[in-house]
Every structure is written in C-alpha cells, then in structure tokens.
Image (spheres, grey):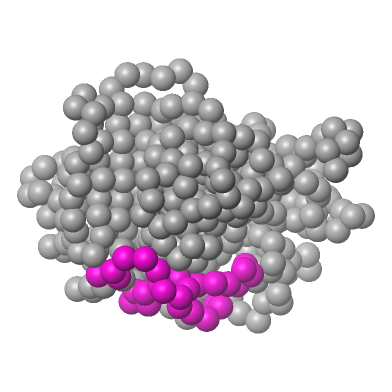
Amino acid sequence: MRSYSHLCVFFAAALVPAISFAYGEGDDIPYNARAIHLLTNEARTDPAVALETCGNNCAEGLACYEGARQPLYWRTDLAHAAQFHAKMTSDLSCMQHPSPCELVSTIADDYPDKCDGSVACACVGGTASCHSTGTDTFDRITLFTGKEFSSRAENIAFTADPVKAMNMWLNETGGNPGVCDYVGSNGHRWSILSPEYNAIGVGTVNLAVQDFSSIKKETAALSAGSHYMNGTLLWFKTHYYASAEASQVKLVLGDGEDRCRDLELTVGSAVNGVYGISGLSGLEACTPYYYEVVDADGTYTKFPTQGSLLYDCEKSWKAAHAPSCLNPDDPGSPEDPGGDNPGGGDNPGGGDNPGGGDNPGGGDNPGGGDNPGGGDNPGGGEPQDKNDPAASQADAGPKSGSDDCSVTLHRSTQSGWWLLLTGALSLGLIRRRRNSVRN
C-alpha cells in the first residue's frame, strides 16, 4: 500500500471583441489542468478500477462507489476560479481554501486580462497573507460564476503533477465504515466520484485546485482529452460519453501521413469509456494532436472542437489542425497568420457543443485499464510553466503550515457552522445546499 506524507488600453479593448472559444479550446488552459480533468473522468468511468489500490484507506468501502458516473464537463468560470486560486496561493507559498485576502468585487471581469491573479490587483488594499480570513472559498467561486450552485466542492493538492495529485485524492485515508457519504476525511475522493456533480474547473501552478459544481453547460461526446506521463509511460487519452456506442476513435498526431492512430478502450464501455494509446516516443516539442470519434449513428465529434492540443509546449492549444482521419469533409485548418494564439479573450473553454450528446445511463466496465494513480508523492509542487509531462519535479519552496497535517472543512447550510476535522493526508472542502438553483 502506498502512503503519502505531503498533501496537505481600454479604448482599444472597446473596439476589439473578446474571442469566445468552443469546448476544449483555449491556449491558457494549463496542460496539467487538462490532464487532471481527463483523469477525473477516467476515475468516474469505473471507480472500482480507480480505487483498486485504495484498500483500507477507503474505510467507507468500495461499495459506495459502484457503477459508472457521468463525466464532469469543463466550465470556464469554474476553471478561472480554480486557476486564480492556484496562482495566488502558489505565489504566497500557502495552501488553503479561503482566499488569503478580501478579493476585489470586479475580479471575475478583471481576470485574467486585466489582473493575472497577483495580490496587487486582486486584493483590496493590495495585500494578502496566508491563513488570513479573506474571501470565503464559495464566495470566491460565486464571484467568478455569478451564481450559486446546489452543490459545490473544492479539492487542493500540493503538487501539480496530474497522476500524483489524483493518487493522493483518491487514496486518502478516511471515511466511516459503511457510511456512503462525505464525512470530511474522505472529501477528495467523494468529490471526485460523487454523482451529484457534473461540472468542473481545474487550475494548476505549483499546486492543483479542482472546483466542482452541479450545473453543466456542455454535453460533448468527447468530454476531455490530454496526454500525461504515468512514470516513464506516455499516454494519450480521451473520454467518450454518449447514448450511441463509439464506433471509431482516433488520435490525430502531427500532420504527416502517419498521423492517424487508432485508440483502444482502456476502461469503461463503448458508451462511457476512456480510449487511449501509450508508448509513443520521439515526439517533437509542440507536436499538435486532437481526438475524433464516429459513433454507431454516424455522428462525428472532435476534441477540441477546433484547433489542436499541443505536446510539450508553452501553450496547450492552437487554432490550426491537421486533416481529419474520420471526417472527409474536414481538410484541416491552416496556421493562424498571427501565430498559434488566436487572440485574447477570457474564455478558454466555454461555448456550445456542436455535436455529440450525453448518455443518460452509466455503462459497464469490460475490465482492464490502467490505474490513474500510482507513483510516490514527491511533496511540494512543480514550478514548470511548460506543457511538458516529463519536466523535473522541484520544490516550490517553503509553504505555510506543516506538510504532514491538513484540514477538511464542511459547512452545513442548516446549522450555518463550520465543522473542522483534521486528517493526515487530505485537504478538501465541500458545501451542499438543499435548495435547487436554476442555471
């Protein structure tokens, strides 16, 4: 059993409209955030596979997580809330859920174009300190989303490595035997696998932040896609979820004659499953790639909707893409005359889904698949800015608080009190509301 000890020009703007990106697009989504989104949906596809190394750590019992869940769809506003918090807390070398200052009321409009998350522009008075009583976690999320959700939660891990963060969250020690519910000590695992959530935003800098909600905007057949390193093994994967079975799923890698790669089902089913390929090597930096699927009804879906993701590159997305391997009507799109970045705009991944559809049911796991966890926790974070899955791990520097202690917070809206629980491996926060909120 693995154990972990470190978890714990205004005028010009008025004339040029902000660019709105469609689902999966946006060059300011960090690579690690994309990978964590993918691995989260992989875990939800078959929780039994995701928790196969949890053992006694999952005190509530694996029976609490039987059956496939629907995927979590990316929400740009949640991603901004998470990325903003990851940036600010990384800059201050502190790990906490509340913002370490009172945030300016215009932060959602200012971020990221006018304010990059720095204390000077994001905090009232331009000052902040760790463990201060600043803006509450859910007040921060509401500032960015403009609404309150029926259920919300946030996970934090003091590493931005996708596999290590997921392993920490999923395999934390906690839960009460036979109690299939959030109990504080199992908060990360419960939030990742809970069927009450259907939307997510992820932010990564030196640490990783997941923000969850109960209201989605998208129903894309390909809910997520990325590449990541599991040890020394490079994976390319995408998650498919629709009412019709996937018929063909491909990775379009690069723009050469050999760009078309067949993907195999690694976990889940043909209506709710992860398709991937591993072992590719010798790829050049900034190699473009994207995923595409044709379902049994002949419906074609691409991820990202337009453009390509990028391997080992400063950005994680560009507007151009190579000719399709499954859609004869898509000859590809050329490089943007202005470069890889299509322009400004503050929405890295919203927009409407042009196709696909969602699956009202789960799906059985035919077995197999790889564990999204694994590996040892290096402690600390990683300062890399590049979209480089093999970048070396480095300590983010001293952070406030102890590496081997943490807290889990839960707020009951009926009592209005905060319940503070200590745990050895986890830092999670969740809030539930019983009233329904219209999107």
Residue 251 position within the rendered picture, expressed as x and y whole percent measured from the top left: 63, 59
Which residue is at 21% across, 33% downward? 417
- Pick the residue in front: 317 or 137: 137
Which residue is at 78% across, 52% downward? 319
- Outermost residue on the right side: it is 337
Residue 439 position within the rendered picture, expressed as x and y whole percent measured from the top left: 49, 21
Q: Is residue 399 magenta?
A: yes
Q: Which residues are magenta?
A: 375-404
Residue 18: image quadrant is top right
Asked if residue 18 lies left or right of residue 415, the reply is right
Residue 5: image quadrant is bottom left
Relative to 104, residue 320 above or below: below
Residue 52 position within the rendered picture, expressed as x and y whole percent measured from the top left: 24, 62
Q: From the image, give the main secondary structure of the stretch colored magenta.
A: loop
Q: Is residue 328 magenta?
A: no
- Pick the residue in front: 436 or 356: 436
Residue 231 position within the rendered picture, expressed as x and y whole percent measured from the top left: 43, 78
Which residue is at 58% across, 50% downward? 126
Q: Is residue 93 visible?
A: yes
- Pick the residue in front: 415 or 371: 415
Quadrant where the image shows the N terminus: bottom left
Relative to 284, residue 119 above or below: above
- Outermost residue on the left side: it is 177
